[in-house]
Amino acid sequence: MSIREETQWLDATASAELIESGEVSALEMTEAAIERIEALDGPLNAVVLRWFDHARDVAASDLPAGPFKGVPFLIKDLWLRYEGQCRTDGNVAMAANPIPATTDSVLVHRFKQAGLITLGRSASPELGTLPVTETVAHGATRNPWNTDHSPGGSSGGAGAAVAAGMVPIAHASDGGGSIRIPASACGLVGLKTSQGRITMEGHGIETGLGVDFCVSRSVRDSAALLDAVHGPGVGDSIIAPAPNRPYVDELGVDPGSLKIGLVDSHTQGGALHDDCRDAARAAGAMLESLGHRVELGHPATMADQSFTPRFMAMWAASRRTGMGTIEKTLGRPLTEDEVEPQNWAQAQFAEELSAAQYGDALTAVAEYRRATQQWWADGWDLLVTPTLAEPPPRIGELDAQPGQPMAGMMRAGEIVPYTPPFNTSGQPAISLPLYWSADGLPIGVQLVAAYGREDILFQVSSQLEAAMPWADRRPPA
């Protein structure tokens, strides 16, 4: 068996151990990942910018002695700077005019110090807007479990690449579910950290909603990477409380008997697919068998339909700000034919917003955050929900329609009711691959903890990983 085959399904921790032992060199591990991308990515379209020669040079150099020394990695094609390399943000104008970055973002520097070797950029929808990854610039990214379906978004390329075995771990970001959605759709672990846990310098838009982190194959990989990259950067205005000990030390720790709320309905009044309901209930039953107290319950804010229209002023403004970041990079304004319809429509809406409307959106977010976190303050320890309300959508299902540029966004609201609340509240939430449909599609389950309590998420996630293991589940191709 070749190194390419031997290492395909190792998680990042096992990959690093193999390199540390001397059985495989960092360059050999890098070449194996390059071979897998070249062999597997054709029908998936997960890796849209390839830096293979650069990766070989890095792998042959004196690497930092981080926990993932020599492990192949991908960075999402959105916002983060990597010195000497380009990004496109999923936009046709950026793709047509590649401009290398002159510096690293702080998080990219931390990835390098952890020893990770970046092979290129994974696909993202334009500006990271939609929960699918299909762009005019790069085409559709497909799910390795079934290529008729999406791997989710906006970190869909990362999800598809890790699920297909191209790399063991990849950078992802989450402003409304964009780590947890592809984790659910692709059968991976996806942690959205607490707001302020990892610096957002270099991300381009600091709304207070988004976070950067990863999708991974195992809970231990997410814990070890968080240990390596967490902490504030210069000028950060939101800083999460420091952990009491390394996150890897939480794995296998008994959290005691927790009071856990369970959601088995569509909190916004839509339809919840039976597979997604069954996944959440199965997780709840397993948690009960592990000694936790589980009952139906969730923050009332999750069903508050008056929040969305107030919040949309802030969301639309962030689309316009994102376009402004691209315009600054290009050195000129974007034209309508260079921006996808849903983003252009939101940007035009933002242009017409008043300061009073934007102020009301900020007030709505603050009210929502406090009211949501109060549920945990009132005595609950965890919340369990489906990650998505439906199995992974089909390719093209969220396309804009003639005269209806926001059709995809409206459809997204039906599929994704459970993840955005915790971007708004700033709380940590993790999607775990605990269920598969009869059709063989992954169905994720989301766990949500109080602000700053990633430790509890790692404790309970490691319990579930041991009780409902997924490591041997692999896409049919």
Image: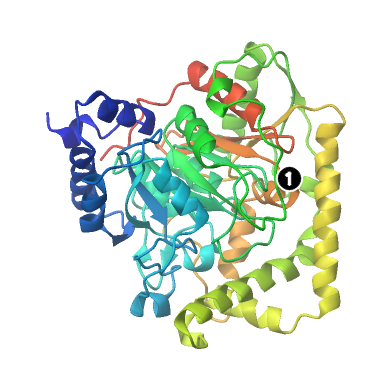
Viewer-proximal residue among 176 and 56: 56
Where is mark 1, residue-wise? 267
Q: Residue at x 46, y 42 (%)?
A: 215
Amino acid type assigned to the residue bearing label 1 in the image: Thr
Secondary element at tag 1 = loop
Location of the N terminus by quadrant is: top left
Viewer-proximal residue among 143 and 348: 348
- Residue 46: where, in percent of width, then height? 34, 55
Question: How many numbered circles does the render carry?
Answer: 1
User: Is 325 above or below relative to 254?
Assistant: below
Query: In this rendering, would 140 be left or right of 327?
Result: left
Q: Residue at x 61, y 71 (%)?
A: 319
Q: Is residue 306 visible?
A: no
**Residue that sits furthest to the left in the current view:** 1
Task: Classify 10 Å Cα crowding around label 1: few (below 14), some (14-19), many (20 and above).
Answer: many
Q: Residue at x 84, y 70 (%)?
A: 359
- Residue 407: where, in percent of width, then height? 58, 69
Viewer-proximal residue among 400 and 73: 73
Location of the C terminus by quadrant is: top left
Q: Is residue 124 visible?
A: yes
Q: Residue at x 61, y 31 (%)?
A: 280
User: Is 154 above or below relative to 197?
Assistant: below
Is the image coloured rainbow, by chain, by secondary structure, or in one colour?
rainbow
- Residue 194: where, in percent of width, then height? 66, 43
